């Protein structure tokens, strides 16, 4: 599904726009993301602000359902998502001047994701680039109330990964991260943790339903003000 030469072709691309609502659409067979969000491209660096993506259908998405690289006040809610080549949500600032401030992903129903995991490791939620935008800021990310019925296929990059397989851990510190009330029936059998959180100041985790036959549910490293199990 994923083809790097065409990954820049999203269903909708948003670049530094203000007050955008995307609702009631069906996105099918995109080469790139379902929705991509970045900053204004002509040099001002203005982030997108006030974006509401809700009640849409995303099916057969070549890269990620959502990529958010430079935005504040974002709500991704009550969307139906299935057959995703990459991750469901990828927060991956490309430069130090990009980032995220106040993003909520809630109430979405997700089927199969990570269908191109034979090429790269994929995640339910990823915010973990170790080399691009290492000093970018990520603040106020809430992932809650999402349901995953599928998950990634078993590959060398995603070895029996669970439906909630997540890594939030950029080198720069993340602040005010909430990951609660998400559920899946797709079991985790890998030896690693299902959900990894690193370098977070203000982390709330818990009430996530994830069956597993191996590994641990959470791995929390170099985090402060942790509330949860």
Image (cartoon, helix red, strand yellow):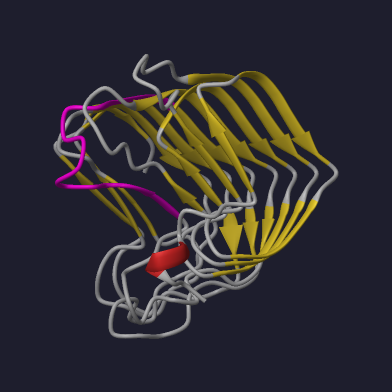
Q: Residue at x 78, y 48 (%)?
A: 56
**Image quadrant in which you'd find residue 17:** top right
The magenta segment is 125-140
Q: Is residue 187 above or below residue 216?
A: below
Q: Residue at x 14, y 46 (%)?
A: 131
In the drawing, does residue 164 fall left or right of residue 200? right
| Residue 209 percent coordinates (x, y) | 55, 58
Closest to the observer, 15 or 50: 15
State yes or no: residue 133 in magenta. yes
The outermost residue toward the right is: 24
Q: Residue at x 50, y 32 (%)?
A: 142
Q: Is residue 26 above or below residue 177?
A: below
Closest to the observer, 55 or 6: 6
**Image quadrant in which you'd find residue 4:** bottom left
State yes or no: residue 37 in magenta. no
| Residue 208 percent coordinates (x, y) | 52, 51
In the drawing, does residue 195 fall left or right of residue 142? left
């Amino acid at each position: 599904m994923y083809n790097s030469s065409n990954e820049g072709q999203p269903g909708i691309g948003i670049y530094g726009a203000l007050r955008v609502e995307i609702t009631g659409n069906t996105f099918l067979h995109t080469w790139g993301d379902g929705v991509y969000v970045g900053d204004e491209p002509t040099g001002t660096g203005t982030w997108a602000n006030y974006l509401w993506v809700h009640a849409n259908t995303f099916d057969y998405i070549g890269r990620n359902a959502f990529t958010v690289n430079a935005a504040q006040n974002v709500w991704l809610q009550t969307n139906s998502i299935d057959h995703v080549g990459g991750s469901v949500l990828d927060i991956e600032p490309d430069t130090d001047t990009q980032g995220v401030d106040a993003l909520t992903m809630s109430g979405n129903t997700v089927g199969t994701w990570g269908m191109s995991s034979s090429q790269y490791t994929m995640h339910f939620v990823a915010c973990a680039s170790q080399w691009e935008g290492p000093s970018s800021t990520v603040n106020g990310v809430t992932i809650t109330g999402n349901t995953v019925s599928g998950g990634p296929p078993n590959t060398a990059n995603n070895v029996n990964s669970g439906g909630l397989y997540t890594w939030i851990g950029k080198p720069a510190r993340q602040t005010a991260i909430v990951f609660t009330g998400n559920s899946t029936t797709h079991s985790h059998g890998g030896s690693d943790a299902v959900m990894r959180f690193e370098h977070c100041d203000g982390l709330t985790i818990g009430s996530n339903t994830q069956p597993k036959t191996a590994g641990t549910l959470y791995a929390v490293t170099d985090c402060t003000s942790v509330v949860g199990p």
